[in-house]
Structure formats: structure tokens, C-alpha cells
Image (spheres, rainbow, N blue to C red):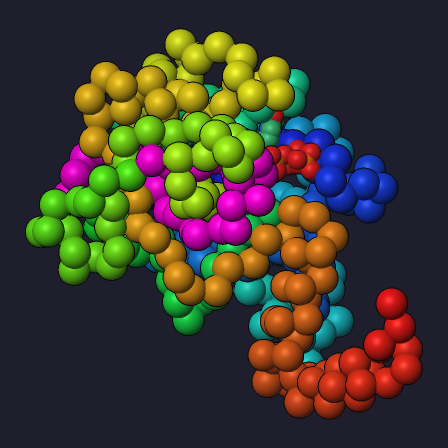
Amino acid sequence: MKAVIPAAGLATRFLPATKVVPKELLPVVDRPVLQYIVEEAAQAGIDDVLLITGRGKTAMVDHFDRRPDLETRLAEKPELLAAVRRPEQLAQIYTCRQPEQLGLGHAVGYAGTHVGDQPFAVMLGDEFVSLSEPLLPAMLDLQARTGGIVLAFAEVPLEETKRYGIASVAPADRSLADLGEVVEVTGLVEKPKPEDAPSNLAVLGRYVLPSAIFEAIGRTGKGSGGEIQLTDAMGLLLKEGMPVHAIVYRGTRYDTGMPLGYLQTVVQLACEREDLGAEFRQWLGEFVASDAGRRT
Ligand code: UTP
């Protein structure tokens, strides 16, 4: 199984930080967002990861390379040495470039040659889930059983539907219930207004797709925002009878694509860290209770 991480977007919601630094490289405590994502892939047994990159994004690939000069300096510091080596040990990283940012569907289309005719996972570069509540393994199983498209949903407040792809769903076959809260998808709409949204089930940044998606992307015209949308390509296959299922995910997910979600992620993961969590939680409690913490 291969994973594709589309990471060529312009990240306008996080400017100016992302003018030079890709949002995938923003640090969460002491490692970049992208490392958490590749950890999630590795935990699901995926060791072949294709990064779709664009202009100014080559540092993302460097993070997964060895640094022999640094490693020599760290010979006496085994913990740091292990941390520096960790990214390179997680997976084989491949890259290709999306020359123009024409949308997520367009970006995924560039993965066709690398992926070939096998099903594959797509993991968006700005969100990840808790390693203690994994999502991908059940999605991979579900795809193996149905042969179709597998998505993951989170319930969102209705007023937020315009930020996501939103699904209409029906109950899934009972035989799939051992994989979690599985639903059958009957329709998908990209970023609807709350009054037009068919549900509050939002598409998360994890997909397991059959290779038929590449040909469907080729037939997909510009959609929402003038971009070639992955949602629209999946919609074509759905209309043509391909089974589309989803798992409703109720674990912890982290959305680092804009400042508020990013800050929440940093605080949550810092609190959980064995090495600095206790000290950080104590400081955070004191800060929140202080005049500065309560200022509005
Ligand atoms: P987003 O909708 O988050 O777009 O793309 P973005 O450019 O990253 O960020 P904003 O909305 O301007 O702040 C979802 C994923 O698809 C990738 C992005 O890198 C992100 O991981 N993407 C999007 C591409 O690789 N290419 C594109 O043309 C568009």
C-alpha cells in the first residue's frame, strides 16, 4: 500500500507564515506536522509515501533525509540522535511536483504513475489523528472488502459545513459493522452553505481510493473555487455505480491548516508529552487563571 500526501497548496489561510515555510513544516512542539502524518502512515503499515510538492517546498523532503554531519555531533546524545534519525526510518519518501496549483484533485492526478493500478491512501498534509485512536487501518480493511472508495467523516457544527466536503449517507451493510461506524455514501457536495448541506458529516483528509480515480480526475472539470476537486472526481465514480463508504471517526483529530486549529494542536500535544507535559500543563493552568490569561 502506498500513501500520497498532496502538499503543494498555497496555504493562504496561514499567511504570512506560509509565504516561505510550507504549512506541513510548521512545528508541533518539536517536530513538523508532516512527521506526525508520516508516523500515522507508518503505524498503518504504509512505508511508501509520495509527497506532491510545489515551488519552495523542497525542505519537506530534506526532513526525511539523513544528516550524517549532525548525527556525528550527536554521538554522545542518544535520545536526540534517535529523534534526528526517526523521520528517515519511517518510510521511503518519493516526490513529484504539481507545477500549478489547480486544486486537490489535480494534485492527486500527478500520483498516477507512482501509484499504478493498486488502491492507495491519500493523506492531506495539514491534519492528522491521534496515534492512540488510529483511523487508517479500518479504512484500508474497508477498501479491501468493498473495492470502492473509502472516506472518513467527522461530525461538524452545521455553521462550519462551508469549510468541508459534506456527504449524504445511508446505512451500510451490517456485515461491515465490525470495522466501526460505517456508512454508505450516496452523495457528496463541496463546501455547501449550512442551508444546502445534506448532513453535518464532513470529509476528513484521509481517503483510500481505487486507481480508477486517476481516469475520473482526467474527466473532472473545474468546480468549487475554480479548482479541480477530488470530491467532484469521486462524485463521478459514485454516479457510475462505484461503492463509496465512510467510517465516522470519533477519535481526536488535529487540523493544523489555520492558526486556531494549529494552536489547539500544539497545546494538546504539548500537554500529552511525557518530557514536558507536566510542566507545561502547570504553566498553562496558571496562565489561564491569571489576569493576562483572562484578558479579552
Ligand atoms: P487546502 O484546501 O487546504 O488548500 O488543500 P491550501 O492551499 O493547502 O490552503 P488554503 O486553503 O489556501 O489555506 C487541501 C490539501 O490539498 C493540497 C494542499 O497542500 C492541502 O494539503 N493541495 C491543494 C495541493 O497539493 N494542490 C492544490 O492545487 C491544492
Q: x and y percent of residue 74 in the render?
A: 71, 74
In the image, which residues are magenta? Answer: 145-168
Q: x and y percent of residue 147 in the render?
A: 19, 35
Q: x and y percent of residue 225 in the render?
A: 62, 21
Q: Quadrant of the C terminus?
A: bottom right
Q: Quadrant of the N terminus?
A: top left
In this view, 186 is above or below 31: above
Q: Quadrant of residue 276?
A: bottom right
- Residue at the spot x=35%, y=23% of the render? 235
Q: Is residue 211 left or right of residue 64?
A: left
As for residue 160 lying within the magenta part, the answer is yes
Q: Residue furthest front?
A: 195
Q: Tell me if residue 99 can be seen.
A: no
Q: Residue furthest left?
A: 175
- Residue at the spot x=39%, y=67% of the render? 133
Q: Is residue 3 left or right of residue 80?
A: left
The answer to which of 153 and 43 lies nearer the viewer is 153
As for residue 5 lying within the magenta part, the answer is no
The answer to which of 94 and 213 lies nearer the viewer is 213
Q: Which quarter of the frame holds ligand 1? A: top right
